[in-house]
Amino acid sequence: MIQWIMNKILPMSLFIIFTVSLFFLVSYRLFVRDELRNIDVKPERSYMENVTITHAAQNRKKFRATVKSVRFSFDENTASLEGIRLASLDKNIVFEAGSGLYDVKKNRMDLRGETTALGRDFQARTTGAVWDVGREEFQANNRVRITSKRLDVGADKMEVMKGEKIRLEGNVRAVFN
């Protein structure tokens, strides 16, 4: 019985496995590989979704950006972003914005729509802002409101330098609780 299996069934099984493998190999070479080669990736038609980028400097994580979608413009060296969440890991601040435009050459991000900055003990809201990544500066040129447990501040403009110094300008009003 074993001799019959070895002589009849084993060679037939090996032949079937070889034939199926050959079929898949030929199919891949004829159809799939050529289709992959013909994909034309263009910025206006291609984008990335659910992207997370972590930036580190001197072996320390500095910030993490999570974006729902990114569209690149290679001519202008910019990236159009939707659903932005930027976490400054060393300063414990999170920025959120509906959309923005990142300029690769200037290393600067223009945040658009309602923009929120959340810290351990405060919340700041404005409409649109600019984050200069290289200079570590954040500017809001529209009305800003900063709230915390003991403070409610409003101003026409705000500038944050290196995450430590804050300058408020125009119609500054503060209420201490």
Image (cartoon, rainbow, N blue to C red):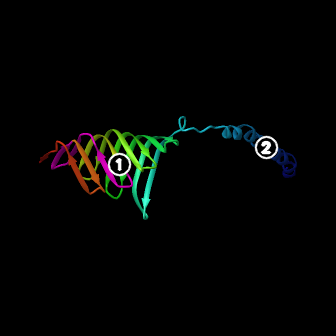
From the viewer's perspective, is 155 left or right of 44? Answer: left
Classify residue 101 by image quadrant: top left
Q: Residues within 10 Å of mark 1 (few under 14, many from 20)?
A: many
Q: Where does the image place residue 102, in percent across and percent down from the top left?
A: 43, 45
Disc 1 marks a residue whose amino acid type is Trp
From the viewer's perspective, is 110 left or right of 41? Answer: left
Q: Residue furthest top?
A: 45
What residue is disc 2 on?
A: 22
Classify residue 91 by image quadrant: bottom left
Residue sitting at 30 percent across and 47 percent down? 139
* Circle 2/circle 1 CB separation < 8 Å: no
Residue sitting at 18 percent across and 45 percent down? 153
- Whether 169 is drawn above or below 58: the answer is above
Q: Residues within 10 Å of mark 2 (few under 14, many from 20)?
A: few
Secondary structure under tag 1 reads: strand
Label located before the other in sequence (2 or 1): 2
Q: Where does the image place residue 42, in percent across and percent down from the top left?
A: 57, 38
What residue is disc 1 on?
A: 131
Disc 2 marks a residue whose amino acid type is Leu
Classify residue 83 by image quadrant: top left
From the viewer's perspective, is 107 left or right of 48? Answer: left
Q: Which residue lies furthest to the bottom in this view?
A: 58
Q: Give the range drawn in magenta.
A: 132-155
Cα separation between marks 2 and 1: 56 Å
Q: Where does the image place residue 1, in percent across and percent down from the top left?
A: 85, 49
Give residue 92's mark: none
Q: Nearer the viewer, mark 2 or mark 1?
A: 1
